[in-house]
Image: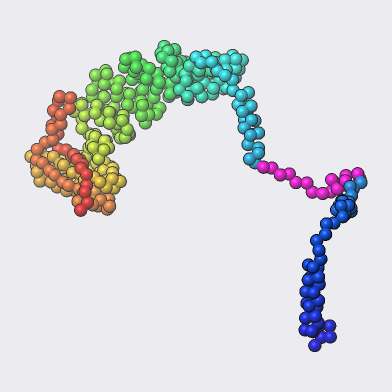
């Protein structure tokens, strides 16, 4: 055993002495300390103020921290933003042009142009007008400035000034498509069909797929009674655009002329424009152009599985041909759209022509394909 290690007897004796000492301390009576005792102790413990040079040295050498409480800064931030808002925006008097002093003094056409465009974007042509006037005045050879000035005049129903502005834009830029297009709209609204047609043709010479020019060209020809050209105009529009209200309206105009190369069918709650399904002579399968329409039908059926489609085929004096055509259409849809339940495709055929009644007139179609839908209830 290590000679320095305490033995058990020593440990027990030390513990007994501690217990005896604690008992004696506890037996002392409670006595109040002298009155001057506390103050004398605190005087001793009071830290001594360092000399001035020590305080200066500590201020330079000790680290400094900054504590920021975000919530306490919120009122300050609100006050700053309020002051910026008040001084940034001036109170505007209704029915007067805002920033009139700025309009008068600022001679930069670009600044005035973009200010005018911003007011037009807010459907406020009255406030846009003075800026666009300045833009066109300080840069008279920029066609865009005259064009948008015309748009502002249109918004204010100042139609003669509108026309003049479009014409000035064209004078500076003969190929300015928006100016030609809107000038056509101006003439169409005024009933000047020939002048409107001329402007739409100029647009289409540069931009053959312009939807507004294609559609309004058909309207102009309709008003002029040029029926054969009108038919071609509607077909030209529908060959490029088959969706939207204008497409459905174009089909209605076309069908009224006795042309059913495009038709509108109801799929559920949607009116869908389709190029009519056609066949070459006595063929039983649709021609290649018709496959685009069938693919559109298949996509609709895949996206809306509540629809049952009736494929109705007419072939005058040839029931067998009508039957085979209807079944081939069904076969094509099932082969190319595997998610379509066969129970959702019904076929019907007739050996009589289809009759269509429009605006009190009856049209007879020797061969045709119709699509009729109903709600599908799965077993």
The location of residue 281, given as percent across then percent down, is: 16, 40
Query: Is residue 351 found left or right of 309 in the rendered image?
Result: left
| Residue at screen point 79% across, 84% down | 9
Q: Front-most of 79 and 360?
A: 79
The location of residue 21, given as percent across then percent down, is: 81, 72
Query: Is residue 282 found left or right of 165 in the rendered image?
Result: left
Quadrant in the picture for residue 18: bottom right
The location of residue 262, given as percent across then percent down, is: 24, 34
The N terminus is located in which quarter? bottom right
| Residue at screen point 20% across, 48% down | 345
Q: Front-most of 227 and 41?
A: 41
Q: Front-most of 306 and 224?
A: 306
Outermost residue toward the front?
Answer: 29
Query: Is residue 319 found left or right of 330 in the rendered image?
Result: left
Q: Front-most of 230 and 337?
A: 337
Quadrant in the picture for residue 254: top left
Outermost residue toward the left?
Answer: 317
Residue 147 visible in the current orientation: no
Quadrant in the picture for residue 153: top left
Residue 137 visible in the current orientation: yes
The colour scheme is: rainbow
Task: Indicate whether 238 appears above or below 305.
Answer: above
Residue 55 colored in magenta in the image: yes
Q: Which residues are magenta?
A: 52-69
Residue 1 colored in magenta in the image: no
| Residue at screen point 43% across, 21% down | 179
């Amino acid at each position: 055993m290590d000679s320095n290690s305490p033995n058990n007897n020593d440990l027990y004796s030390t513990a007994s002495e501690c217990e005896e000492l604690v008992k004696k301390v506890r037996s002392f009576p409670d006595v109040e300390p002298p009155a001057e005792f506390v103050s004398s102790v605190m005087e001793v413990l009071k830290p001594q103020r360092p000399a001035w040079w020590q305080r200066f040295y500590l201020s330079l050498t000790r680290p400094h921290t900054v504590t920021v409480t975000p919530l306490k800064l919120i009122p300050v931030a609100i006050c700053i933003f309020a002051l910026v808002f008040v001084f940034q925006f001036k109170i505007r008097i209704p029915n007067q042009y805002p920033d009139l002093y700025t309009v008068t003094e600022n001679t930069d056409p670009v600044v005035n142009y973009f200010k005018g465009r911003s007011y037009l974007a807010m459907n406020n042509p009255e406030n846009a007008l003075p800026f666009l006037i300045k833009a066109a005045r300080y840069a008279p050879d920029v066609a865009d400035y005259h064009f948008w000035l015309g748009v502002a005049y249109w918004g204010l129903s100042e139609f003669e000034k509108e026309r003049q502005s479009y014409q000035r834009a064209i004078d500076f830029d003969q190929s300015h498509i928006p100016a030609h297009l809107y000038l056509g709209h101006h003439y169409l609204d005024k009933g000047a069909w020939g002048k409107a047609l001329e402007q739409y043709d100029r647009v289409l010479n540069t931009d053959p797929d312009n939807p507004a020019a294609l559609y309004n060209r058909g309207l102009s020809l309709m008003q002029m009674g040029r029926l054969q050209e009108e038919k071609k105009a509607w077909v030209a529009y529908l060959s490029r655009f088959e969706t939207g209200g204008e497409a459905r309206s174009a089909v209605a105009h076309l069908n009224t002329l006795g042309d059913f190369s495009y038709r509108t069918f109801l799929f559920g709650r949607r009116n869908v424009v389709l190029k009519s399904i056609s066949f070459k002579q006595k063929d039983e399968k649709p021609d290649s152009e018709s496959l685009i329409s069938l693919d559109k039908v298949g996509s609709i059926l895949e996206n809306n599985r509540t629809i049952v489609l009736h494929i109705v085929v007419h072939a005058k004096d040839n029931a067998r041909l009508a039957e085979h055509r209807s079944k081939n259409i069904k076969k094509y849809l099932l082969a190319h759209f595997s998610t379509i339940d066969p129970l959702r495709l019904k076929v019907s055929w007739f050996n009589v022509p289809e009759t269509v009644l429009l605006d009190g007139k009856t049209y007879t179609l020797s061969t045709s394909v119709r699509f009729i839908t109903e709600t599908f209830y799965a077993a």
